[in-house]
Amino acid sequence: MLRFPEPIKDLIDYFDRLPGIGPKTAEKLVFYLLKQPKEYLKGFSEALQILHDTIQYCSTCMNFSQTEKCEICANKERDTGTICIVAENHDLAAIEHSGEYNGVYHVLGGTLNPLEGITPELLHIPQLLSRLEKTRVNEIIFAFNSDYEGEATVLYLQKLLKDKGINITRLAQGLPMGSVVEYADEVTLAKAIKGRTEI
Amino acid sequence: MLRFPEPIKDLIDYFDRLPGIGPKTAEKLVFYLLKQPKEYLKGFSEALQILHDTIQYCSTCMNFSQTEKCEICANKERDTGTICIVAENHDLAAIEHSGEYNGVYHVLGGTLNPLEGITPELLHIPQLLSRLEKTRVNEIIFAFNSDYEGEATVLYLQKLLKDKGINITRLAQGLPMGSVVEYADEVTLAKAIKGRTEI
């Protein structure tokens, strides 16, 4: 059985630990890197090194940021009266990419999942509550995945926020772009009918 | 449109350049890394950094190695009279994992592909020839992919080596393990019939 030289094995192990990358892909990536110029590896290595040193949580919305306030919270043209609550930073990124939203965000850092030990205390909920005390907010939009954890988080937060006089909404549920009615699942179709809009 | 903080963007770009990893996956990996302990990122970064500093080509077979001679060439129990010629290091790794081979290797660094500019001079063929002058070799096994480039390389090397009195073989072509005769493609089936073995 072949034993790779230690430095190759080590790097394969690091790639192997990444989500969605198995041992075979990790091997392929390391062999690719071995053929790249030294500068590329040096830059890659440095980019990894400085990630933790330079990135922190935004003190307002818990988004990743280089500064105390993230770019979105610091932007005076954003509507601070509308807060979109997302589970993770990549959800925030997806909504920003849509170009449709001009409010601000609050990143919870996950969704409720008691079975896996993710209880309300582990999410950025206290930060949300103290934020609501300091700022006047008209609308809160829930933007979670359509799964059990997402629904549980919606229910929990809904209860927590109901007496605050804030308009609470959620992302529309229905047919995705490019979908075929015939092949849509029953739940999606039911939600699309229930949430039908006037044209 | 969201602009990620510079250090996040940089690292996404580095991952994005890896084979089989697109911008979406690169984003996912970086967000995962942001949630990992600092020690993991430090170790990952160092593993990348030292890869080029510690890994070199084995002077005999052009395999990756930490020392001047790789572990296989340095192993006195391996049969140096049998050389298996492979295109890339990952092919060598695959054959070693099979546990069936006890000879040594020669890594060409690719297969002939004139259209993409990969001509014989770019492969480790001179190293192979000078190796054959120095060592007595009984058998050379070609272990290339079953594609046009692999076949072209076999033809080229066959011509180059034919007057050297070395027994030249190639990996058996036929049905892979677990395959179904009914669904095998015609070429594979034809090769399997032609190369049938006595039992």
Image (cartoon, coloured by chain):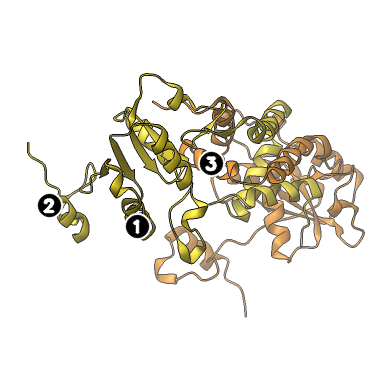
Chain colours: A orange, B yellow
User: Disc 3 to disc 1, how far (Cα)?
Assistant: 21 Å
Query: Camera-side residue: A42 or A113?
Result: A42
SS under mark 3: helix
Q: Evaluate whether residue B32 shows in this view.
A: yes
User: Disc 3 to disc 2, how far (Cα)?
Assistant: 36 Å
- Residue drawn where x is 29% and y is 49% of the image: B162
- Residue drawn where x is 81% and y is 40% of the image: A55
Location of residue A133 (image quadrant): top right
* Mark count: 3
Q: Position of residue B99 (x, y in %)?
A: 32, 28
Q: Which quadrant is home to the N terminus of chain B?
A: bottom right
Query: Camera-side residue: A135 or A59?
Result: A59
Query: Camera-side residue: A79 or B30?
Result: B30
For residue B147, the mark is: 1
Q: Chain of mark 1?
A: B
Q: Evaluate whether residue B185 shows in this view.
A: no
Instruction: Give the residue pinned by disc 2.
Output: B193
Left or right: residue A127 compared with residue B19: right
For residue A31, the mark is: 3
Q: Which quadrant is home to the C terminus of chain B?
A: top left
- Residue drawn where x is 50% and y is 43% of the image: A28
Location of residue A11 (image quadrant): top right
The local crowd at label 3, few if under 14, some if 14 to 19, many if 20 or more residues have their Cα within 10 Å, is some
Q: Position of residue B62 (x, y in %)?
A: 50, 37
Q: For the residue marked with disc 2, what is the amino acid?
A: Ile
SS under mark 1: loop
Q: Chain of mark 3?
A: A
Query: Camera-side residue: B116 or B191?
Result: B116
